[in-house]
Image (cartoon, grey):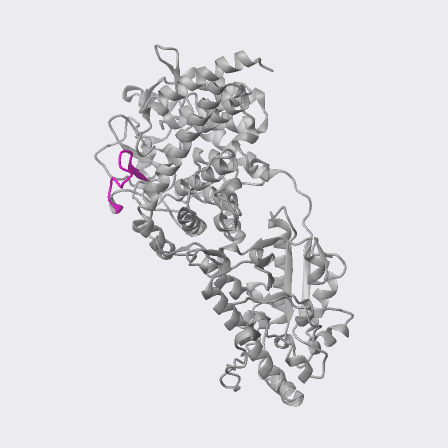
């Protein structure tokens, strides 16, 4: 353990280095860093990596701040981080119209710009003059924003900014299917300027989505209105595509050293230890050299054979760059941080020695990390014949601030001034740790007493919808519609979430809204939306696959997944419940199904163990009443509940013989694996029910209370149902 004096002296040295190499170049108005003294363009990605050393140093000072002078240094460093993050935020908010448009088009010309003027924060090149669509840069911003906010920094100041950040989440949530220009801004390897799916972009988007989920941007001073919401299924889609691509970077790039940022710090986007090791070893074996790592194979950037007058190369021409690609010391910095997080001191020392061997020492003794090392033109042929045999010269910027910042972080970790947990307050580094098996909770509900009685014949005891009150069960399309209100902001012209897709991870949670609790049935079990759900065998197979998927993919630490299934009249085949469904339900009672642990029970029993999300964003934020439900949401819920009740009443009010004949006729008229049926939708006007539920009656859920007496059943006990939305 160092003494106070030695720690302070050493940290003062790093503070001088950070000020001289980084902070002295920070623009005093916008807080952005120019690319060089001669180029005022500020790249989002480079700026974010530059500020990491400042953030790390501020936390190192914070731990030893027992004097006013140290506390002042801590505050100054922290506010430099805040200024840069807010500078980037303001620059992106000036292009809010692009964010809104991109949510619908995913077109490169509608994307946020990748760089801005460091003096004004405005765009510096036109939409079609640069490969602006770089999902990894926006994702990195959200990831660093989440980590800094979790560490205690206050970066976001208003609810308008919260709404913009929420829309940035929508901007990146389709990264798994959005081709972009990638971390090197070039698109495909042949320089044709064509975007493609990049594993580095998808991985960074996945990390950002997971980091932002349920994050309060106001920190300890916030409330429900300042919380960011992410549908877990979007991150899972990114994960599925990412794992299928690694260790490949894209269609044209077999490998890329930029993947080091995905498998380790800062993203930690891969949770398979074997895949992490395979990707790292492949990069080291195929791309590492004496001076650093190549970006990717046959990379012609700044090689002696590069033709600056040509816009692109044909694929067969790339062979002339083989074995003479430039080597970047930047990737030694990534490997140092990687091994610091692993606790592998030997490899940290090994790579630190390799890095310092290629650093350039200034007259004042400060070591600088150059941008890259290239082979000279007269030695290109010898290097190509015998890779690694020729000396290289440093080219590009020196210091390369991106790499210099990561080098300083590595030194702070190596010397014990920082712990890895301080650079990762959200604990993303633990994603690859082995976790206990997930227990999937299954709830089966009957639409009415008739279905319940048929299940009892097979020793399957379930509740009806009426008996689970005050919990309200709704189809996934209701949840999908509610999420369209997320991120809306009239002042900024932002319309909220566009996608209507809601996956099994999202419907396996319970949701609270004011004094109500909702459970949603899975999207692919919706009898009105998906005709494939009419095939019992296919439905049982889909259900089993969903349970296995939840067991593998569930990452919610506070609660188990809960699947709520609704057995309706549509499930019956000639008045009987299909054996495929009965067999599956009986398997659930054993506690395992296809190797996944499950527990079958009642919805009320799972309230204390289920994951519950608060739909706080449905409040009237813009009207100044965040605790009051948005009038549009209230109207939608009332209309939907009334419509659902009307359909049930119209169906149940038929004579039993007519009802059974209708079902029998429908079932007997179709043959095949998938039974195509039609749902009966009768509106309230047809039934002469207009005006029946108005005024105070809307304060409770109009479901079953009036129907059950007509069927000769006892109504639910008074007060057993929670009050619904009040006007």
- Which residue is at the front of the view, 160 or 363? 160
Q: Is residue 329 left or right of residue 36?
A: right
Q: Is residue 359 left or right of residue 674?
A: left
Considering the whole magenta stretch, tell me its main secondary structure.
loop
State the quadrant of the N terminus. top right
Check the image and report above or below for 673 versus 291: below
**The residue stretch that appears in magenta:** 115-127
- Which residue is at the front of the view, 48 or 678? 48
User: Residue 292 appears at what percent x and percent y?
Assistant: 42, 24
Residue at (56, 35) in percent of width and height: 429
In the rendered image, the residue lying farthest to the left is 309
Q: Is any part of residue 258 visible from this angle?
A: yes
Check the image and report above or below for 630 versus 116: below
User: Residue 196 appears at what percent x and percent y?
Assistant: 38, 47
- Which residue is at the front of the view, 714 or 286? 714
Check the image and report above or below for 378 versus 120: above
User: Residue 160 appears at what percent x and percent y?
Assistant: 40, 49
Q: Is residue 279 left or right of residue 367?
A: right
User: Residue 14 appears at what percent x and percent y?
Assistant: 44, 18
Residue at (63, 88) in percent of width and height: 661
């Amino acid at each position: 353990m160092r003494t106070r004096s030695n720690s302070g002296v050493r940290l003062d040295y790093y503070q001088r280095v950070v000020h001289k190499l980084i902070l002295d170049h920070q623009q005093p108005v916008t807080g952005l860093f120019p690319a060089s003294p001669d180029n005022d363009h500020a790249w989002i990605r480079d700026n974010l990596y530059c500020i990491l050393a400042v953030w790390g140093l501020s936390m190192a000072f914070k731990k030893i701040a027992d004097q006013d002078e140290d506390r002042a240094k801590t505050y100054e460093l922290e506010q430099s981080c805040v200024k840069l993050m807010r500078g980037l935020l303001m620059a992106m908010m000036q292009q809010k119209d692009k964010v809104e448009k991109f949510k619908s088009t995913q077109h490169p010309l509608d994307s946020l710009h990748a760089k801005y003027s460091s003096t004004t924060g405005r765009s510096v090149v036109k939409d079609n003059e640069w490969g602006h669509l770089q999902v990894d840069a926006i994702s990195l911003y959200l990831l660093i924003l989440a980590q800094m906010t979790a560490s205690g920094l206050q970066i976001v100041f208003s609810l308008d900014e919260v709404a913009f950040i929420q829309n940035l989440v929508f901007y990146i949530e389709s990264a798994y299917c959005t081709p972009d220009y990638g971390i090197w801004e070039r698109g495909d390897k042949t320089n044709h300027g064509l975007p493609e799916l990049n594993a580095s972009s998808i991985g960074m988007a996945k990390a950002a989505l997971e980091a932002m989920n349920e994050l309060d941007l106001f920190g300890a001073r916030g409330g429900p209105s300042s919380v960011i919401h992410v549908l877990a299924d979007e991150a899972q889609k990114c994960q599925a595509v990412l794992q299928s691509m690694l260790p490949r970077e894209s269609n044209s790039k077999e490998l890329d050293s930029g993947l080091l940022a995905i498998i380790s710090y800062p993203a930690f986007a891969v949770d398979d230890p074997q895949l992490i090791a395979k990707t790292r070893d492949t990069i080291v074996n195929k791309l590492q050299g004496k001076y650093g790592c190549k970006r990717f194979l046959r990379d012609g950037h700044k090689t002696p054979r590069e033709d600056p007058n040509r816009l692109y190369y044909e694929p067969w021409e790339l062979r002339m760059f083989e074995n003479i690609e430039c080597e970047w010391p930047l990737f030694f910095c990534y490997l140092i941080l990687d091994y610091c997080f692993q606790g592998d001191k030997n490899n940290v020392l090994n790579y630190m020695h390799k890095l310092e061997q290629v650093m350039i020492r200034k007259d004042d003794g400060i070591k600088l990390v150059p941008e890259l090392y290239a082979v000279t033109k007269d030695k290109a042929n010898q290097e190509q014949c015998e890779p690694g045999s020729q000396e290289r010269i440093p080219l590009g910027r020196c210091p390369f601030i991106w790499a210099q910042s990561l080098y300083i972080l590595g030194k702070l970790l190596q010397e014990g001034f920082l712990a890895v947990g301080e650079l990762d307050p959200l604990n993303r580094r633990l994603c690859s740790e082995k976790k206990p098996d997930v227990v999937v909770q299954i709830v089966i509900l009957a639409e009415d007493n008739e279905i319940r009685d048929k299940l009892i014949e097979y020793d399957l005891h379930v509740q009806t919808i009426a008996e689970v009150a005050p919990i309200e069960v709704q189809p996934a399309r209701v949840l999908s519609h509610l999420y369209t209100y997320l991120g809306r902001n009239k002042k900024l012209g932002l319309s909220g979430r566009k996608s209507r897709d809601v996956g099994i991870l999202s419907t396996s949670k319970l949701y609270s809204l004011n004094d109500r609790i909702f459970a949603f049935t899975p999207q692919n079990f919706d009898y009105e939306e998906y005709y494939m759900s009419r095939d019992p065998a296919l439905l049982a197979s889909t259900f089993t696959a969903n349970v296995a998927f939840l067991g593998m993919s569930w990452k919610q630490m506070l609660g188990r997944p809960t699947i709520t299934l609704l057995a309706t009249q549509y499930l019956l085949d000639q008045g009987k419940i299909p054996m495929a469904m009965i067999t599956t339900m009986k398997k659930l009672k054993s506690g395992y199904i296809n190797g996944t642990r499950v527990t079958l029970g009642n919805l009320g029993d799972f309230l204390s163990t289920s994951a519950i999300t608060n739909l706080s964003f449905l409040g009237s934020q813009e009207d100044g009443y965040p605790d009051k439900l948005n009038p549009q949401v209230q109207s939608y819920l009332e209309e939907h509940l009334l419509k659902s009740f009307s359909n049930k009443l119209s169906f149940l009010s038929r004579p039993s013989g007519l009802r059974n004949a209708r079902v029998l006729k429908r079932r007997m008229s179709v043959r095949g694996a998938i039974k195509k049926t039609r749902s009966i939708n009768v509106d309230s006007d047809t039934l002469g029910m207009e005006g029946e539920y108005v005024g105070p009656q809307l304060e409770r859920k109009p479901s079953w209370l009036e129907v059950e007496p007509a069927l000769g059943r006892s109504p639910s006990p008074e007060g057993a149902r929670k009050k619904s939305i009040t006007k």
